[in-house]
Amino acid sequence: MLIDILFIALAVVLLWFGANWIVDSASAIARKFKVSELVIGLTIVAMGTSAPEFLVTITAAFKGLEDISLSNVVGSNIFNLGFILGAMAMIAPIPTNRTILYRDGMLLWGTTGLVLLMGLTGILPWWFGLLLLIGLFLYLAYLFKNGSRLGLDDCESIECAPATWKDYPKLLAGFVAIAYGGEFMVTHASNLAAGLGVSSWAIGVTIVAAGTSLPELVTCLAASMKGRNEMLLGNLIGSDFFNFAGVLGLTCLLRPLAVSAQALPNLFVLVGMVGLVLFFIRTGWKVTRWEGAMLILINMGRWAFDFMG
């Protein structure tokens, strides 16, 4: 047990430093190429922070642990929009805009609903995974072709300077740190949780999902502290979409997943939560503190139901 605790502490350190490196270097690269931080958050940062979800989901699928595989993706998405977005909004209200609502948010909502509809059949087949991957490719191509462009910031501080050669290995080091940090967190937190005698689905949708979502949490916290709210919201929505279209899509393509009865209530909750977040984005074009508190309560209520179930 002591070894597990030490590895969890190491995971926290890796996740924190890795997230800071990603936020700093990705922002600098965005300024150098005059690409908006929203687009960077929706793509590079989102995919980087989703690396732990990918590693856990694909490994669990090939080990025949389908509940862990699917619950990790579903649970991570609920955790991202519930606890993480809620916590960041409680720290400071998050400004939003039409682009992230009508382009990115609606796409996530539609994809979530599609996964739910397919889940009602009891299986996510290989061709559905291929469909998700094609959707991801088209979305990324559209973003990089038509994503909003920015000029350099007007400030004169070092933090506002465009990227140098050091930012590229720094970005790679950040991805490596969060990948290892997420893996350590999941492995050793699961060892501790297994002794509680709860189901693999409950562990996957709560402990494992929270562990693999820690990169999103610390990245968003770092972005919030640096005042980069567009990267924050873009990272969460982009990570959720990438979890479904990229992580789940590739997993299903390689190994079709059976959908258990425990998965469906969580998928219904996730569809409702995405819709609620879109509503919050539209009301006053910001996510307020009380709205953030509501998202956290929904997330905690979902956890309680899974553990008691």
Image (cartoon, helix red, strand yellow):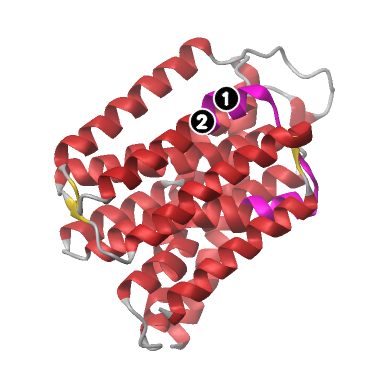
Amino acid type, mark 1: Tyr
Residue type marked 2: Met
Residue drawn at x 43%, y 46% as measured from the top left: 50
Is the residue 65 above or below the residue 190 in the image?
above
Residue tagged 2: 106
Give the SS element for disc 1.
helix
Q: Cβ–Cβ below 8 Å for labels 2 and 1?
A: yes
Q: Is residue 100 magenta?
A: yes
| Residue 191 image offset from top left, x and y in percent | 37, 80
Across and down, in percent, residue 152 comes to 73, 15
**Label 1, on which residue?**
102
Task: Work out whether 305 lies above or below 254.
Answer: below
Residue 287 in the magenta stretch? The answer is no
- Residue under the image location 71 percent in, 51 percent down: 88
The image quarter in which residue 217 lies: bottom right
The residue at 44%/59% (across/down) is 75
